[in-house]
Structure formats: structure tokens, C-alpha cells
Amino acid sequence: MISQLTRLRPSPIRCIGTYHKTGTVWMRRVFKDVAAAIGSDFVDLREADAAAVPQKNTIYLEDHTHFPAPFLKRKVRGIRIVRDPRDVVISGAHYHARSSEAWLHEAKPFFDGKTYAEMINSFETITDRYRFEMDNAAADTIAAMTDAKGDKAQQQFLEQNFLTVKYEDLVEDTELTEFSKVCRHLKLPVRKAKSAFLKHSLFANKNAVGHHGRSGKKAQWKTVFDQKLGRAFADRHQRSLEILGYETDDSWIESLKP
């Protein structure tokens, strides 16, 4: 009888894809520890040569789920973490108003020479900041989650090789049901991988978010959005909510405060 270890030995190329404000720092911590536990290499693609050929027995993380060209020609085992676009707007608006990330402080001609940080902080109300965010950085993230921003080769690569996992399912995965699915898809030994997930889980470790995030809670939009803001979001991104499986129509707006 072939042992589980033997079945796993031809170690695949494993890819972890996240998007801006969908748990990148969290997944980096989890899978860096998973790699160490199983004797695999871990590569953050932001720090790698984009022309490098992907290697087996390696876990790669791409923080915008836009993998370099050499990956698109290979068979990989991948997951991508998506998040409710409404919460992407909320998380992004708060983060972009205070973050020191360099791109937020670069003058942009389409903002009349102002930076993203200056623009979002120029609005007096948080509601106006949310509106600005859903038209700008969050819109870019939502487009990436929905159809790889129209990049057909990238989208086909994701459809053929990746399991789509919702952030909301992982953030409260106390029974490791969703994480076990992830492990099976990635051909990871659950027993060795689960300790890393539990160590960095948002339900077991209140400091897992760290300084990078404001809150890891799901469905923040239910108490943050009112009907007017909900309608503004739906006018822009309702189709994406449906494609990603968060809503079937716009009746969710009716549940919001007037």
C-alpha cells in the first residue's frame, strides 16, 4: 500500500495568490511556516526575478495574483484568496489614509499632482473616503479578483490551476474545514500544515493582523454602509459581487440602515 508520504513526494509547484487587503500578510506568515514544516522553499514573488522558472517543492506567493509569464506555461497547484469587495473598500480606505507605503505618497498627474494619500485625506467624511476608494484602488483590486483585469492568459491560468477561497471562510475556520480543502488542493500534509494556520489564525491570535491591518473581521459593510452608500457601491461593482459569489442581486441594499 502506498503511504501518504509517498503519494506526496512528487512535490508540485504551489502558488498562493492574494489581492490588496485580502490577507496578504496573513497568508505570507502561514505559508512561510508551512514551507518550513514540510521542507519546502518559500518565495515571495515581489522579491524574485520575474523571468525565473518556477520550481517544484516551492511555495510561491504573489500579492496581486498576477503571476509572471514563466508560470503561465506550467501546471501548478494554486489557491487565490478573494474578499467581499465591500470590505475591500472599507479596509482600503482606512489603510490608505495612514499607510507609509511609497506608492501612496507619489504625486500622480491624474490627481493634479497630488498623491493618493493626499487625495483620500482631503475628504472630510469617511463616507466620501469610501466613495473615493471604490472608484480608485479598490476598483483595481475588484477588477483583479473578478477577471484578472481583462488579462485573458492570466485568467485562464487561474481558472485551470487555482482553487478560489473566500477570506470570510478562512477567517473563522476554527474547525479547519476550509484549510483542509486548501491542503488537499495544494497536496499538503494537513497535520504538518495546520499548526502554521492555527498559529497565525485571526480567531486564535488577536495580533495576527499586526500593524498592517485595522481589523480582520468579515462583513464590516453591514454596519458601515447605509443604503445611499450601498447603492453607490452597487452602481459600480454589483456585477463583481455576483461573479465572486457574494450576492445574487442588489436586494442586500434593503437590509442597510436608511
Image (tube, helix red, strand yellow):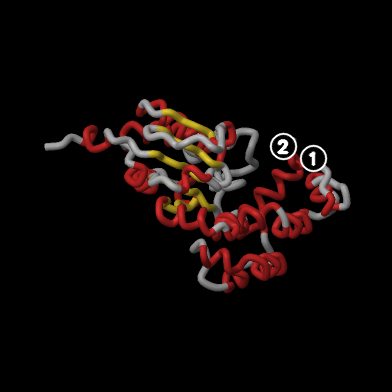
Residue drawn at 79 percent across, 50 percent down: 120
Asked if residue 47 shows in the view, the reply is yes
- Image coords of residue 149 (percent x, y): 60, 58
Instruction: Tell me the element at label 2.
Output: loop
- Image coords of residue 254 (percent x, y): 61, 72
User: For residue 188, which quarter of the picture?
Assistant: top left
Residue drawn at 41 percent across, 45 percent down: 74
The image shows residue 184, relative to residue 237, as above or below, that is: above
Reading the image, the residue beneath label 1 is: 105
142 left or right of 7 in image: right
- Amino acid of disc 2: Glu
Can you say which quadrant of the picture contains the N terminus? top left
Q: Residues within 10 Å of mark 2 (few under 14, many from 20)?
A: few
Viewer-proximal residue among 216 and 236: 236
172 left or right of 128 in image: left
Asked if the residue under mark 1 is in contact with the one under mark 2, i.e. CB atoms within 8 Å, the reply is yes
- Amino acid of disc 1: His
Residue drawn at 72 percent across, 69 percent down: 228
Residue drawn at 38 percent across, 35 percent down: 56
Reading the image, the residue beneath label 2 is: 101
Q: In 3D space, how far apart are the residues under numbered discs 2 and 1 (Cα atoms)?
A: 7 Å
Asked if residue 206 shows in the view, the reply is no
Q: Residues within 10 Å of mark 1 (few under 14, many from 20)?
A: some
Instruction: Tell me the element at label 1.
Output: helix
